[in-house]
């Protein structure tokens, strides 16, 4: 074990020096800031997989110099240039229709309903499994955490 520690230290330092960072230790969600292409490798020379729309939440799985490997709500993995990721948080509706309520309570007035695949701005977590969100049109309220992805 004593011989292994210096080897691990060298690998760690050399990976940092080479511009690589280690995989994210905690789940990190980011939001796509502009319509952009996702690739199968961390390079614009990689194969183009698909176009991802603005305001889509993604989970950062691996971060390399200038690139992030991300997972979307459907579980697909792809590479995106870091410059297209924002620290602003968003979530995406996974239920057929999510009910957004005035308060974090099933009996509270319905503010609006959001259909599947609609992106909502994440504002804050609330007690009881609720999340405060805002629609792009400005309406805000509370949605059940089991109706969205990106938490």
Image (cartoon, rainbow, N blue to C red):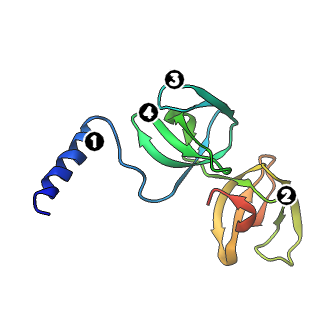
Q: Residue at the location (68% across, 37% down)?
A: 54
Q: Quadrant of residue 66?
A: top left
Identify the secondary structure beneath mark 3. loop
Identify the secondary structure beneath mark 2. loop
Can you identify the residue that label 3 sits on? 44
Mark 2 or mark 3: name the one nearer the start of the chain.
3
Kindly check if marks 1 and 3 are in contact, taking CB atoms under 8 A apart as contact. no
Can you identify the residue that label 1 sits on? 16
Mark 4 or mark 2: name the one nearer the start of the chain.
4
Can you identify the residue that label 2 sits on? 96
Q: Nearer the viewer, mark 3 or mark 4?
A: 3
- Mark 4 Cα within 10 Å, few/some/many (few <14, many 20+)? few
Q: Nearer the viewer, mark 4 or mark 2?
A: 2
Q: CA distance from mark 4 to mark 2?
A: 35 Å
Q: Nearer the viewer, mark 1 or mark 3?
A: 3
Q: Residue at the location (13% across, 53% down)?
A: 6
- Mark 1 Cα within 10 Å, few/some/many (few <14, many 20+)? some
């Amino acid at each position: 074990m004593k011989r292994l520690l210096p080897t691990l230290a060298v690998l760690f330092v050399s990976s940092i020096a080479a511009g690589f960072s280690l995989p994210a230790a905690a789940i990190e969600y980011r939001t796509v800031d502009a319509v952009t292409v996702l690739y199968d490798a961390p390079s614009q020379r990689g194969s183009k997989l698909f176009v991802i729309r603005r305001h889509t939440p993604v989970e950062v799985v691996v971060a390399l110099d200038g690139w992030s490997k991300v997972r979307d709500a459907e579980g697909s993995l792809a590479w995106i240039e870091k410059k297209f990721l924002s620290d602003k948080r968003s979530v995406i509706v996974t239920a057929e229709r999510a009910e957004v309520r005035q308060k974090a309570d099933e009996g509270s007035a319905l503010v609006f309903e959001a259909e599947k695949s609609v992106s909502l701005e994440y504002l804050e977590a609330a007690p009881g499994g609720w999340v405060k969100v805002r629609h792009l049109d400005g309406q805000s309220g509370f949605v059940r955490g089991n109706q969205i992805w990106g938490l």
